[in-house]
Amino acid sequence: MRSQKDSILLIDDNEENKSELHEILSDTYTVIDVNNITEALTKLENHSHKISMILLDLMISNMEGFTFLSELQKREAIMNIPVIVITSEYSELKEEEALQLGAYDIISKPFQPAIIRRRIENTIQSLKTAAVINLIERDALTGLYSMNFFTEKVTEVLQTCANEKYLVIFANISRFKLVNELFGRTEGDELLRFIGKTMIEMIGEHELCGHAGADNFFLFMKQECYSEAILRAIVDRLNNYPIPINIVMRFGVYTLDDITMPIDKIFDRAKLAVDTFDGNYDSYICYYDDSIRQKLLREQMITNAMKAAITEKQFIVFYQPKFDLITESVIGAEALVRWIHPEYGFLSPGEFIPIFEKNGFISELDYYVWECVCQKIATWIETGHEVIPISVNVSRVDLYNPKLPKLLYELVQRYKIPIQYLHLEITESAYTDNAKQMIEIVNEIRRYGFVIEMDDFGTGYSSLNMLSDLPIEILKLDMSFLRNNVGRSSGRSVIKFIINLAKWLGLFVVAEGVETQDQALFLKNMGCDYAQGYYYSKPVAEVDFEKLLLETRINVPN
Ligand code: C2E
Ligand code: CA
Ligand code: CA
């Protein structure tokens, strides 16, 4: 059953041909007449998707049919519409040339209605089969376009409607892996399917949605159709998704200012906008703009300067003491790296660490810091100085190195320092990224005798029942945890609960980011063991730290 007639564009200026073909075809097809090739190309460019096939009189206006065929080949958006050429007299040479120029088939006069109908039907049918193959290129999971098809569609739109303004939006879920990790792949797939459905409903049929694998999605739309409310509506839907963790979707929006830019670069810009979110959990839309370009340039500058910074010893280790809340004595310290660049001045670890984590240089820097700390401890031991455990940061990237446990062990061996003096801080989110593998490697490190502190507790998503399985001795409450909870009575109960739970599991608790006496007092009353923060001391240079140690009575826990 045919719901709508297929349309054939008939390019012919010969009245006799036209009326004969109309007679043969009009019952089955909508025949659109044009008299010259300029008109034909305009019609095709504006209505390409409505035209199923072209019938072309090769002899039109003095053999312009050939020109038409070669013009068609230059236009990507319409080049795949099949052309059947009509030749008035048999000429093998001309037919061959027409076929060479991409003609699909040839019919010659005198017209034989049955054969013409059959040839046309075959041609249109094969085109439809090709369209079905494209349709399979819809992603089976989400029902959205596959990236190949999406890219093709976007290219086509940009070529045919170049005078419009367009946007590309990249959407991605923060910590999607966690859904798979905690609830299983089937649940993860279910969520992706839900997102696909939501996007189609919210964006509508006129815009394009593509699924770029995993939790990555692309949208393409006219600027006039875009509003933040559309993205808000998607976020609202996801907020109500029945799963016990918060699904956070973020959007990077790039308004195309130059449509001749390669398509990959266009997609990259929307993606880069999402990459700049960092830890800001309140916003969910980021626009690619000049500040992002500046940020990328700065990232490049940092990357270019990092290698020399190690050899030229531009990285300096600072120490921030940790205090016992009851005795108020220093019980340890955290080593925090600083970068003093001869030209750019002081660079914050908050800026360069995430860049090094992305480009992999963090492992080299971390090793450098660990070695500086081991050297320091060794000197203290040699000189009879008081020794306290120093905690170093171990990036999640380091944990992907299966040789890490041995590397750390050989380091303390080389400097002959008792293993309990080098504590390792591993951020909570490292465990949730790839729980099984991470737990295994941390366990191996721990078997050598290292003390493991779980850093930034409260920012990741480790469920409380997971806590008892993790190979750790010390829980470091993240400073945001303290900040968000001390002020409210329900928050205070949460802190109390966590501290009690930690005690019950036999863990020590350190609170970081303690800035006021009130906070210190509160933590002490809650049974927290240790504190670190500006209230006690900022991170300080080595010499100042040694002075501080001498001034404060030291009480090392066993
Ligand atoms: P972190 O491990 O959570 O370190 C604590 C951060 O909080 C430090 O920032 C510290 O200076 C800051 N801080 C301490 N007390 C207070 C306070 O009372 N109030 C406030 N507002 N801040 C406080 P810093 O030194 O800028 O380091 C930032 C992050 O960079 C660190 O967070 C850590 O994740 C990373 N980092 C620093 N050094 C290293 C390193 O050698 N290796 C690795 N992998 N990461 C490092
Ligand atoms: Ca830390
Ligand atoms: Ca921390």
Image (cartoon, rainbow, N blue to C red):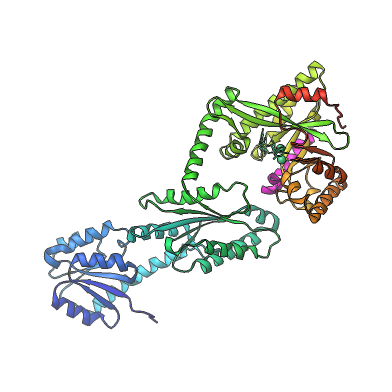
Q: How many marks?
A: 0
Q: Nearer the viewer, residue 126 or 340?
A: 340
The reply to whether residue 276 is in sight is yes
Which residue is pictured at 73% across the width and 24% down the height? 544
Q: Is residue 446 magenta?
A: yes
Q: Is residue 522 magenta?
A: no
Where residue 35 appears, x then y in whole percent? 17, 71
Q: Residue furthest top?
A: 383
Magenta stretch mostly in which secondary structure?
Answer: helix
Q: Nearer the viewer, residue 533 or 162?
A: 533
Taking the image as four quarters, which one is ligand 2 found in?
top right
Which residue is pictured at 73% across the width and 44% down the height? 479
Question: For residue 323, what is the image quadrant?
Answer: top right
In the shown orientation, is residue 338 left or right of residue 493?
left
Span shown in magenta: 428-450
In the shown orientation, is residue 509 left or right of residue 41?
right
Q: Nearer the viewer, residue 216 or 85?
A: 216
Question: For residue 399, what is the image quadrant?
Answer: top right
Where residue 9 appears, x then y in whole percent? 25, 72
Which residue is pictured at 85% across the width and 27% down the height? 554
Which residue is pictured at 65% across the width and 26% down the height? 316
Where residue 238 appears, x then y in whole percent? 62, 63
The quadrant in which the C terminus is found is top right
Where residue 285 appears, x then y in whole percent? 54, 55
Question: For residue 552, what is the image quadrant?
Answer: top right
Indicate whether 48 appears above or below 526. below
Indicate whether 283 appears above or below 524. below
In the shown orientation, is residue 251 left or right of residue 546?
left
The quadrant in which the N terminus is found is bottom left
Q: Residue furthest front?
A: 517
Indicate whether 185 appears above or below 348. below
Indicate whether 248 appears above or below 443. below
